Image (cartoon, grey):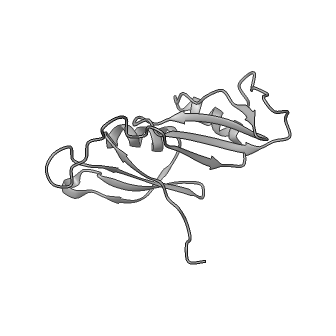
Amino acid sequence: MNVKQAVPFFKVSDMKASIRFYVDGLGCEIGQKWEPDGQLRWCWLKLGEAALMLQQFPTSGQDSWTPSGEAGEGVTVVFICEDALQLFNEFRARGLEASRPFVSNGMWLTSLTDPDGYKLDFESDTDVPEGTRLEGEQG
């Protein structure tokens, strides 16, 4: 196959807020970046084997973009991982509002929404009964 990877590309309204969420909160690493005039405008982020790109576009002039509504409306990216419960605890420890995990379709699921409204789901396989909700914090 010639296709190697699909990488979500999010247009963001405030790169600094997005970096706080993705790097400081989720634990992503910046792989590549574009910084015209010393300002971060585009970056390739890595989280384990997953990746995504962020770009802040000017709101006026050449190459401008302003969303007609919330930028992330209707977009969900699902990350399949080894342990969604561990990630839930890590996200909460870093101050993010991750949803309390529950079992859906045979997988633990926790969700977050980034500053522009993009929904991120983190899921991992489990044998726990469907509909089970995580009661307390995991160690």
Tell me what residue is drawn at x 22 percent, y 57 percent.
36
- Left or right of 35? Residue 49 is right
- Left or right of 65? Residue 102 is right
Q: Nearer the viewer, residue 89 or 13?
A: 13
Q: Give the residue furthest to the bottom.
A: 2
- Quadrant into which the N terminus falls: bottom right
- Quadrant into which the C terminus falls: top right
- Left or right of 54? Residue 57 is left
x%, y% of residue 29? Answer: 48, 52
Tell me what residue is drawn at x 81 percent, y 42 percent.
126
Q: Give the residue furthest to the left.
A: 61
x%, y% of residue 65? Answer: 25, 47
Q: How many marks?
A: 0
Q: Give the residue furthest to the top.
A: 135
Q: Nearer the viewer, residue 51 or 118?
A: 118
x%, y% of residue 21? Answer: 45, 38
Q: Quadrant of residue 106?
A: top right
x%, y% of residue 69? Answer: 34, 35
Tell me what residue is drawn at x 46 percent, y 36 percent.
114
Q: Quadrant of residue 49?
A: bottom right
- Left or right of 59? Residue 43 is right
- The answer to whether 60 is drawn above or below residue 37 in the figure is above
